[in-house]
């Protein structure tokens, strides 16, 4: 049986995650429990959602540098408006998703570099977040808190949620006709256009969908942290890009993998926990995270090479 | 319609026009009282953005995907190490500068080794590198704030004939960069690689060598900027580079360098750097709070790129 390239794309990130997890279990066997796993992957859900959002934008050959600012903005809305008056909160979120669609249209129509437009938008989202919550505060809506801290039997919530996110996005992006169109725009805009599709509409829809996932990320984050501040998720911009790449995605060509992206996000989260188990001095925590990123990518290269050698034989 | 054609052939005019408009708007509000001080402050702070922007411009010229995210960490580490090495002694100023430049060399080589050997996309490679550099900076800094040597501190904060010394340094570096870009074979090479790597390879351009030099150049410029910034602000801080990550990209792109690569623009970096500083100071003078200031800064960036970006559709 021939293995599809899509599966191969998944094997490498999954192996990296398994390796890292094994290392954590080896160092701290007590992590091999319900509570342990929950603690390890606690913060993975919002990162996974943000990574999926970034992956959608990257599927149409763009890059969203405002992801962290936007998730922070959504977290602030969740902790203030959505908690106090849900209807207003939902309206704000709908407006924000519409804004994302508009950004997609503007980038497409004016042929602007997405990096710059989203860079500008990151200031806008940060500004709005600061206006809402000048100092850390707010409160998580009860249902978000309940959802994120619920304890399903046997498997911790973080893992259940990650699997659901991975499966839902996998079917939406890899198995549906809409998903094919999105990836088609990344692969070859002209051929999608010639086939009679409206690329503007596809791009707008992709951006809106990315906005939707980023909104979910903000809500999930507040559900975990119970309060928000304007800078809560700024590092998500780089984390989400790294997650997509770790998961086997590419910057151009519409080559993305939703399951890989979720696994990438889990790997990044686990890397953080791994370092605290290693008792690495806090000075070197960030540096070690960089080193892990490099090692995983080197591993990917190595496996890719082996793969090619197998094929050519 | 030669005027319009001039406008399209020289896209950096946009950023200067915007800069002058913002400058007038600010000075009008204060009744002309602050025009000299404002101009000097703008030149000083723009100079820092120009220095990192120049390096980033060379990298972006290499083509899509080429961006150096290690700029802020490099600035921080360079400032921290140089001040520690100089240890407030005036005699060590040149040694400190050389150490900074060497550090830039090492980081540039490190970045390119990751990109080339591990085939990591430049964004991720420089990001991972920046994590390691930042950790080294935290480790060397240890919360200590060492003052710069007196002569160096005076040099960075004083003016020559009313023009800030920092701005003169940035101007000299810009002229060197311009010559490098427009008059040397290296400049032609990076433009060629940015326009089409495949075609560049076919013509026998040493692609790896050129890219390596470009990443070294970017890291060295970031190091020099960190050295100057730390001396200017009376000591290195761990977050001193952070705002220069987005800034270095923003000034390059607003200045009219094509993000897709192969087309760069040095005067535009000056226009964009002055513009970015003046926008913030204008909003400050008008008394906007932090939130509104951020929102307006973002909207202005987008407005400028919308106005200036139309030419890309003409191609």
Image (cartoon, rainbow, N blue to C red):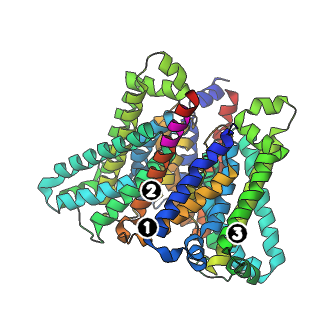
Do the residues indicated by labels 1 and 2 lie within the same chain of the protein? Answer: yes
The part of the image, by quadrant, that contains residue A262 is bottom right
Question: Counting residues from the N terminus, which is met first, the one under dot 3 or under dot 1?
Answer: 3
Q: Residue B296, can we see it?
A: no
Q: Residue furthest right?
A: A196
Pinpoint residue B100: horizontal percent, then vertical percent. 26, 49
**Callout 2: few (<14), some (14-19), or many (20+) C-alpha neighbours within 10 Å?**
some
Front residue of A313/B133: it is A313
Q: Secondary structure at mark 1?
A: helix
Q: Which residue is mark 1?
A: A275
Are the two marked residues, 1 and 2, in contact with CB atoms closer than 8 angstroms?
yes
Q: Secondary structure at mark 3?
A: helix
Quadrant where the image shows the N terminus of chain B: top right
Residue segment shown in magenta? A302-308
Residue at image x 53%, y 19%?
B199
**Callout 1: few (<14), some (14-19), or many (20+) C-alpha neighbours within 10 Å?**
some
Q: Nearer the viewer, mark 2 or mark 3?
A: 3
Q: Which residue is mark 3?
A: A160
Tag 2, which chain?
A: A
Q: How far, Cα to Cα, is label 2 from label 3?
A: 25 Å
Looking at the picture, does residue B148 appear above or below residue B173?
below
Q: Which residue is mark 2?
A: A292
Please tell me the numbered disc located at residue B45: none
Prevailing secondary structure class for the magenta stretch in the rendered image: helix
């Amino acid at each position: 049986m021939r293995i599809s390239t899509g599966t191969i794309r998944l094997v490498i990130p999954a192996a990296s995650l398994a390796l890292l997890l094994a290392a954590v279990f080896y160092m701290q066997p007590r992590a091999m429990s319900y509570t342990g796993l929950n603690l390890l992957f606690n913060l993975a859900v919002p990162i996974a959602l943000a990574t999926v959002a970034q992956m959608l934008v990257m599927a149409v050959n763009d890059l969203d540098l405002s992801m962290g600012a936007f998730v922070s903005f959504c977290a602030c809305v969740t902790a203030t408006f959505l908690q106090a008056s849900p209807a207003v909160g939902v309206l704000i979120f709908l407006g924000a998703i519409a804004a994302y669609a508009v950004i997609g249209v503007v980038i497409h129509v004016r042929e602007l570099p997405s990096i710059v437009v989203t860079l500008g938008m990151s200031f806008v989202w940060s500004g709005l977040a600061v206006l809402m919550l000048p100092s850390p505060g707010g409160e998580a809506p009860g249902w978000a808190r309940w959802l994120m801290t619920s304890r399903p039997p046997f498997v911790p919530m973080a893992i259940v949620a990650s699997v659901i996110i991975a499966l839902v996005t996998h079917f939406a992006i890899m198995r549906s006709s809409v998903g094919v169109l999105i990836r088609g725009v990344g692969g070859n805009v002209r051929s999608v256009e010639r086939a009679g599709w409206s690329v503007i509409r596809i791009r707008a829809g992709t951006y809106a969908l990315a906005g939707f996932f980023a909104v979910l990320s903000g809500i999930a984050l507040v559900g975990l942290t119970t309060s928000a501040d304007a800078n809560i998720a700024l590092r998500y911009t780089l984390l989400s890009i790294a997650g997509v790449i770790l998961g086997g995605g590419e910057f151009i060509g519409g080559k993305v993998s939703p399951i890989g992206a979720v696994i990438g996000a889990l790997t990044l989260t686990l890397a953080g926990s791994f370092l605290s188990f290693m008792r690495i001095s806090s000075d070197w925590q960030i540096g070690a995270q960089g080193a892990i990123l490099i090692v995983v990518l080197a591993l990917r290269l190595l496996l890719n090479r082996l793969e090619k050698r197998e094929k050519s034989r | 319609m030669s005027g319009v054609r001039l406008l399209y052939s020289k896209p950096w005019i946009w950023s200067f026009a915007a800069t002058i408009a913002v400058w007038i708007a600010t000075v009008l509000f204060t009744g002309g009282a602050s025009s000299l001080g404002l101009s000097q402050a703008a030149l000083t702070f723009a100079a820092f953005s120009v220095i990192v922007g120049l390096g980033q411009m060379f990298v972006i010229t290499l083509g899509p995907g080429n961006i150096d995210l290690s700029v802020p960490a490099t600035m921080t580490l360079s400032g921290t190490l140089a001040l520690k090495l100089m240890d407030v002694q005036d005699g060590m100023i040149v040694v400190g500068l050389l150490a900074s430049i060497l550090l830039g060399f090492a980081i540039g080589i490190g970045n390119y080794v990751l990109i080339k050997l591990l085939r990591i996309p430049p964004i991720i490679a420089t990001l991972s590198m920046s994590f390691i550099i930042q950790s080294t900076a935290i480790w060397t800094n240890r919360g200590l704030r060492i003052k710069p040597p007196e002569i160096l501190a005076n040099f960075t904060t004083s003016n020559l004939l009313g023009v800030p010394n920092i701005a003169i340094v940035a101007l000299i570096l810009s002229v060197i960069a311009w010559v490098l870009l427009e008059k040397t074979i290296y400049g032609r090479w990076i433009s060629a690689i940015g326009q089409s790597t495949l075609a560049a390879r076919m013509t026998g351009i040493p692609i790896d060598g050129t890219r390596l030099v470009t990443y070294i150049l970017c890291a060295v410029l970031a190091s020099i900027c960190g050295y100057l910034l730390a001396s200017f602000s009376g000591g290195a801080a761990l977050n001193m580079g952070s705002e220069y990550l987005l800034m270095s990209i923003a000034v390059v792109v607003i200045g009219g360098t094509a993000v897709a690569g192969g087309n760069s623009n040095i005067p535009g970096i000056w226009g964009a750097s002055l513009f970015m500083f003046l926008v913030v100071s204008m909003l400050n003078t008008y008394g906007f709070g932090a939130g509104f200031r951020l929102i307006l800064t973002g909207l202005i960036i987008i407005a400028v790129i919308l106005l200036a970006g139309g030419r890309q559709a003409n191609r």
